[in-house]
Amino acid sequence: MTTAHTQEQLLTFFVAGAEYGVEILRVQEIRGWSQPMPLPRTPPFVKGVINIRGDIVPIADLRERLGLPPGAPTATTAIVVLRIDHGDRSTVRGIVVDAMSDVTNVDVAHIKPPPAVAEAAGFAAFARGIAIVDDKLITILDVDRVFPSSPAGDAGDGALPLSPATAALAPRPL
Amino acid sequence: MNKAPRANLELPAALDVAGAPELRALLVAALRHPEIAIDGSKIQQLDTAGVQLLCALVRAAERRGVALRWTVVSPMLVTCVKLLGVGDVLRLDGVRQEGVEWFE
Amino acid sequence: MKPAHATTQEMLLLTFLEESFEGLERLEAGLLELDAGVSSERIDDLFRVVHSMKGGAAAIGVGELVSLVHAMEGILDGLRRGEPLAADTSSALLRGVDAIRTTLGERQAGRVVALDAHAELTALLERYAARSHGRSAPAARPLEAPGDWRIDLVPGPELMRGGTDPLKLLRALGELGPLAVTAELDGLPDLDALDPAACYLRWQIRLAGAVPRAAIDDLFGWLEGPCEVTIRRAEPTPGPAEAPSAPAAAGDEAGVLVAGAGSTIRVDIDKIDQLMNMVGELVITQSMLGELDGDGPIDAARLARIREGLGQLARNTRALQDSVMRLRSMPMSTVFKRLPRLVHDLGKQLGKEVELEIAGENTELDKAVLEHLGDPLVHLVRNCVDHGIEPAGERLAAGKPRAGRIRVSAEHRGGDVVVEISDDGRGLDSERILATARRRGLVAPGVALDEHAMLQLVIQPGFSTATEVTSVSGRGVGMDVVHRHVEDLGGDVSLASERGRGVRIALRLPLTLATIDGQLIRAGAHTFVIPLLSITESVVIDPRHQSRLGGACEVYRLRQQLIPMIELAALLGLPGAHPGHHDRRMMVIVSATGGPLGFVVDELLAQQQVVVKSLETNYQRVAGLAGATILGDGRVAFILDVAALAQLARSALPTAA
């Protein structure tokens, strides 16, 4: 994949002692921690939703997404609110991180693909690459894949319940 | 000619063809004074005959040197005067308006 | 959008157009009822609508309408004086409504239809009007181009004595268009000498505007008593262009008036009041915060109050935001109102008797969504009348009532709006659908389909072009287009049909913005909103009425019913449930398919109108939830989808957390 820029600008943060980064253009805002309202029947790393100026925004815990045990929020815990692209649609979703780090420019040439061990660790699915900046190792996340891809449709048995008379006539709605 | 001071002419509510003879008598009587102050605020019913009589009053006053002054008029009178196109004769611009707007 | 410097004339025209469209709706609704018999007040109302439309049209210079409207006014005048209504008259009047609408639509686009565009209809209406007045119809008059008129009115001296008042004449003339009147008083004798009841004045009148000669003639035709009236065409007065179709020499601004029917919105005054209240609260909060600004140290106490004020500010802003967004929601009636006329006309045209029932017209929906709903809805109803409802004879033979019934309803169901269209006609013919599908290559030969799959075929693009199928193929616009419309809005379509019994179509529209009246409840640590419409009643739990059925299911005995008790948190798989601690708790009983359910709650909180936020905007649909809302304190509360929860509850045993 070619990119027109030779540098990428990343927003970096810490989760469980390791440093991760996301493309800064995808970051809508950074918020302090607030307790999300838990959503029923969602994967465990989806902690729930919060209200951002009237919008309902789902929040994922990056720790749990990485397969790590959950941790309690601290004074530095933050929520990075991202803009996620799904083809023709985009959504706003947040990830919980332990602490914010920095904004860093990274030479594209210095970004390496994730090593095989990432596969084993389970985050190959959403790690785009590894960058080394000033002796620090930053795992660059693919924003669009942090939340597992699911079409914006039924999450469960969300079948349309028809009115009784219709239900009597129709075997099953679309 | 009656040398009494100014006549205060209060026009009745109805100035129409039915009451035209009485109205004419009223106007003629007023013309015996050197000065007439006309209060037209009570006018609620008006037709061409009534307006015609008022025009005749103004003309007659001019001819006899009687000073005519409108003190207050009803908006209805103003509208009818405009509608009948006699605004040059019955000059009501700037006169205070009070009373009935329009019939119906 | 108005051009940057709309002239007064243009603004007047816009207002006239807006009022006239509204007037036409009232007129149409009233005319449709005329057949059924209508009060004299109603007829008066209709007359007034037409009368003011005539006056407005003349005054503004929409001359091409005046004759038509005048003729309609004549008929309505006869009706309100007690004339009987002839059968063909009301349909002619309805045609008149259509003609006016078209003409006004052209004006909106900056065009003027030709004067004779509606000549035939006008002549027809004039004949009807004359018929009811007992006059013979006037001979067809040659149409004259509009222009200024010069009218000389020389009344005979006996005119007023005969009961005719020139003032009234001039007033009536003034309703046709702008007038300039000059009176001549040369013949007026001295006050002493004149005859008070004789008329000595004469008038020269200039009638500007595009008034047809016919209208002026009509006015003076009623003149009783000797009178000389001369009507001539005069030179047009120079001055600013009157019609919006003035030549472009006036520059860019003179040009096209595009009122844009969709650019204005009528708003319930309550909503405006609410908005004003919120702005008021905002102002209070702002001044409170303003007071906290000042000299002196910012100590803990002041800081706390500032924080409080900011919190208040956030609440106010949120409430204001919601309130403004709610302005955009409009009732379904704006879409439904086209239907009665459609059904009426189509039924007459096809020789079928059809009754239309409308329910839930007050259901509100965002304006943008509503606008996209109109066409699909019209198409579906048209199909019902066209293909669904059988002719009276066939219906009677089938044991059905003579008139076909079409029902259109809209309701909020779990945060969606569901619009249902159903008829009691012949239903879809699945054999012919299958045959057509086979012929079109949509289904391989020899493949059999179940009822459900069959119905989905109808929605396939390209299916509806078949002409011989009696199913929901329209006039070149098919079910697939409807489906696409609804999908674009984020919804879906479902179809049910029973041969010989009818068809039912449900359009589900997920709402990005809607409000519902909800009951806030607390269940454990969770706050939920239950749509009020679903709630039958709420009871305090009396432990003596509780029982356990089959070891796992708790039921409550209420009067003669056994109501299953549901722990919401447990059902939704959320932490923090308190199973078994039912002391002094409450149960909210909801109605759902299959019977009532009782949601066990800890506390009943407020009942309020909440704004429905879709979970799908940023996430996805979650089973059991109809959406979410934001409470006054900024927390998110989920709105329960009662129907889905009922399904969930019935299909799974309630689990203990």
Image (cartoon, rainbow, N blue to C red):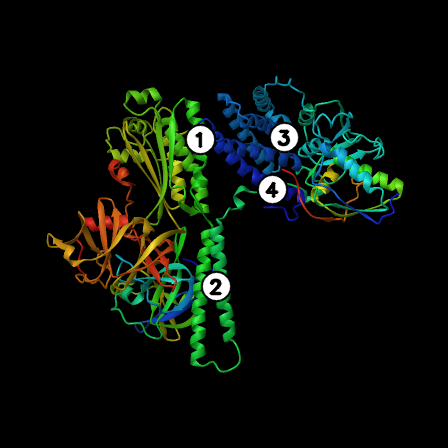
Say whether disc 3 or disc 1 marks the residue closer to the N-terminus. 3
Q: Is residue A119 visible?
A: yes
Specify the subunit that label 4 lies on: C
Question: Do marks 4 and 2 both belong to one polypeptide chain?
Answer: yes
- Residue type beneath disc 2: Glu
| Residue C477 to residue B8: above or below | above
Q: Quadrant of residue C108?
A: top right
Mark number for residue B49?
none
Mark 3 to mark 2 CA distance (whole Å): 51 Å
| Position in image of residue C251 (x %, y %) | 70, 43
Specify the subunit that label 3 lies on: C
| Residue C432 to residue B77: above or below | above
- Residue type beneath disc 4: Leu
- Residue underneath mark 4: C14
Specify the subunit that label 2 lies on: C
| Closer mark to the observer between disc 3 and disc 4 | 3
Say whether disc 3 or disc 4 marks the residue closer to the N-terminus. 4
- Residue underneath mark 3: C66
- Residue type beneath disc 1: Leu
Mark number for residue C342?
1
**Residue that sits furthest to the left in the current view:** C550
How packed is label 1: few (under 14 Cα within 10 Å), some, or many (20 or more)?
some
- Camera-side residue: A123 or C563? C563
| Position in image of residue B30 (x %, y %) | 81, 42
- Residue type beneath disc 3: Val
- Camera-side residue: C470 or C93? C93
Mark 1 to mark 2 CA distance (whole Å): 47 Å
| Position in image of residue C504 (x %, y %) | 32, 35
| Residue shown at the point (45%, 37%) measured from the top left | C337
Mark number for residue C281?
2
Say whether disc 4 or disc 1 marks the residue closer to the N-terminus. 4
Say whether disc 3 or disc 2 marks the residue closer to the N-terminus. 3
